[in-house]
Image (cartoon, helix red, strand yellow):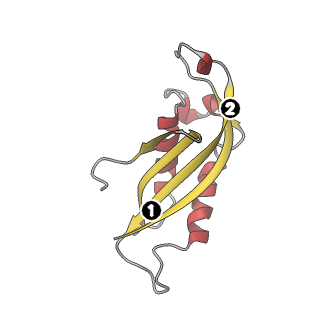
Amino acid sequence: MFELVVQVEFAAAHRLRGYSGECENLHGHNWQIDVYLRGDRLNELGMLIDFKDAKQHVNAVLRMLDHKYLNDLDYFSERNPTTEHVARFVAEELARRVPPEVRIHRVTAWESGRCGATYWQEGNP
């Protein structure tokens, strides 16, 4: 089994609906996203996926979030735009883009240097 990690950043604003505290107000983060990709077969060059291609897929997803007000996005209309849901959004959107032999193992979204949340699908060791 092979695992790659790609780290990227984006900036976005949100507010947490129903939250009692400062985060109920409009605020923003410079999010860091760690994407872990897994697979058991390498291509003819000896790569699971070229880092350049992996970053292109990840950046395509992050363009949907970057410099946006997350609450306005359809995905977050029924989900609070928490760090947990940001990680899930990235994982689900990325899974639609990568080749089938590459699996999204997990995605960690960091809203600050010390606070993050990880999403992975059940049964995805």
Percent across and percent down for residue 111 are 58, 38
- For the N terminus, the quadrant is bottom left
- In the rendered image, the residue lying farthest to the left is 123
Residue that label 2 marks: 28
Q: How many numbered circles are shown? A: 2
Percent across and percent down for residue 66 are 68, 44
| Residue under the point 41% across and 79% down | 42
- In the rendered image, the residue lying farthest to the front is 114
Amino acid type indicated by mark 2:
Gly
Please name whichever residue, 16 or 57, is drawn nearer the observer in this view of the structure: 16
Please tell me whether residue 95 is drawn above or below residue 4 in the rendered image: above
As drawn, the label of residue 37 is 1
Percent across and percent down for residue 24 are 60, 18
Considering the numbered disc 2 on the image, is that residue within a helix, a strand or a loop?
strand
- In the rendered image, the residue lying farthest to the top is 20
| Residue under the point 53% across and 35% down | 75
Please name whichever residue, 102 or 78, is drawn nearer the observer in this view of the structure: 102
- State left or right for residue 121 relative to residue 31: left
**Mark before the other along the chain sequence, 1 or 2:** 2
As drawn, the label of residue 19 is none
Considering the numbered disc 1 on the image, is that residue within a helix, a strand or a loop?
strand
- State left or right for residue 111 relative to residue 117: right
- In the rendered image, the residue lying farthest to the right is 67
- State left or right for residue 4 relative to residue 72: left
| Residue under the point 42% across and 44% down | 119
Percent across and percent down for residue 3 are 42, 66
* Mark 1 surroundings: few (<14), some (14-19) or many (≥20) residues within 10 A: many
Task: Tell me where residue 112 sits by quadrant.
Answer: top right
- For the C terminus, the quadrant is bottom left
* Mark 2 surroundings: few (<14), some (14-19) or many (≥20) residues within 10 A: some
Amino acid type indicated by mark 1:
Leu
Inter-mark Cα distance, 1 to 2: 27 Å
